[in-house]
Amino acid sequence: MKDDCCAPKGDFDLAVIGAGSAGFSAAITAAEGGKRVALIGHGTIGGTCVNVGCVPSKTMIRAAEAVHGARAASRFPGLHGEAQVSDWAALVAAKDDLVATLRQKKYADLLPSYDGVTYIDEGPARLVPGGVDVGGRWITAPKVIVATGGRPAVPDIRGIQDAPALDSTSLLELERPPESLIFLGGGYIGVELAQMMARMGTRVTIICRSRLLPRTEPELSEALTATLRAEGLTILDGATYHAARRDGDRAVLTVTVDGAVRDLTADRLVLTTGRVPNTEELGLSEVGVETDQRGAIRVGDDMQTTEPGIFAAGDVTDRDQFVYMAAYGAKLASRNAVLGGAEYYDNSAMPWVVFTDPQVAGVGLTEAQARAAGHDVKTSVLTLDNVPRALAARDTRGLIKLVANRVTDRLLGGVILAPEGADSVQTLVLALKFGMTTKALGETIFPYLTTVEGLKLAAQTFDIDVTKLSCCAG
């Protein structure tokens, strides 16, 4: 249903602020339950994922993989391939067309399908007692869900505001690829976009305070670092940021690396040091909604804030920052708010993916997390040169690490670094969800010459030396 300016006050059961993935999930859930919903726009309809996040970045990453794949043909004897970016503007235009198509098809065009949803986009939204003030229009509803998302963070570095800098959004809008870029931050956004730009022909440096992907296993971080360096990226980890400045049209970043102060210069800095929630103008404190030190809304496992009747979901909260978890949390919030639900947020078997090449994917606890939780831990690490699929593909970049309880043998978590590793992680998700042991996983039948077979071999590695097995003998 389109904006209905004549809807009477008090005509809504639920007000949802934000029309991205979380907002739509909440609104659709309530509407399907027969409730009347005010879906209040906050920024471009569709939110982060379709407009400036998942969709545009992944299509550009795939394009970069195509360029690299042609060059990588030489790993097979007798083959040689070359590819290059011949028309950057056409590539960006195709990306923008995909974004516009999906925004229209998966968001704007869905609204008329739900008679219970009224879309309102009349100005900034602010929480008030009993509802929401939207640009001076009072929307009354007994329950509210905040789903206003987040945006790229600007690091607290002296001079950063004056230096030529991009973020993950403006990087994907460039009219031409720069000759050089310095990425600040080695998290998942930074490593994905840095590798993509390097494969497009840009000279790339990544600077990070600790290591690449600091929240995952150190073995995986080390292997990914080696892979990116082999592709020509410069990675400076364990760095301290001091200052940034403009030098003509270029950016200068002053850092300390390995005890030495250095000035690094590039066409642009790329700020990929995290994201911040969009909470500043919502009037949260006035209605009793607490936030953490980042400004993220604190929610309980039922997705309710510190103020009864006000819920929140997605990147605006202190929960997982993934689009599918935003939609999941919003669905729970909607059910609990207006459909009589008593459901609780559960991320114990939540998969996550980093779209580098090789891809990084994982689920459950890391070794450090498992030990901190009090488990008697055992681990196995299997490099891809032990996986027949990788040998046949002549691409053994990567590894698999599994974490289990030594006493019960139950799997606690695992990570995969492998080409298309994201397509294998769901098997591990199901193994954790249904409480499998390493022995049970190792005894499961897997198809030969697949990447996912590596999970079986990694499970068997707890007890045997898989290098001594013949093909399919496990």
Image (tube, rainbow, N blue to C red):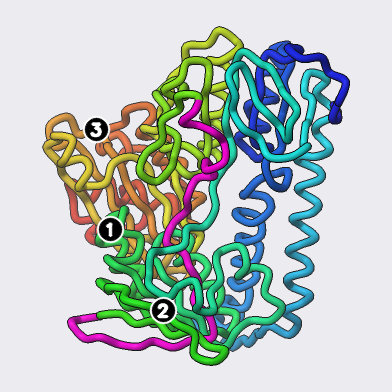
Residue 231 visible from this viewpoint: no
Going 59% across and 66% down the picture, which residue do you hit?
61
Residue type at the position of mark 2: Ala
| Residue at mark 1 | 382
Residue type at the position of mark 3: Arg
Residue 213 visible from this viewpoint: yes
Going 66% across and 45% down the picture, which residue do you hit?
47
Snapshot quadrant of residue 173: bottom right
Q: Which residues are magenta?
A: 257-286
SS for dot 3: loop
Going 31% across and 31% down the picture, which residue do you hit?
436
Q: CA distance from mark 3 to mark 1?
A: 18 Å
- Looking at the image, tell me whether mark 3 or mark 1 is earlier in sequence order: 1
| Residue at mark 2 | 244
SS for dot 1: strand
Q: CA distance from mark 2 to mark 3?
A: 49 Å
The answer to whether residue 302 is left or right of residue 151 is left
Quarter holding the N terminus is: top right
The residue lying toward the viewer, choosing from 31 and 147, is: 147
| Residue at mark 3 | 410
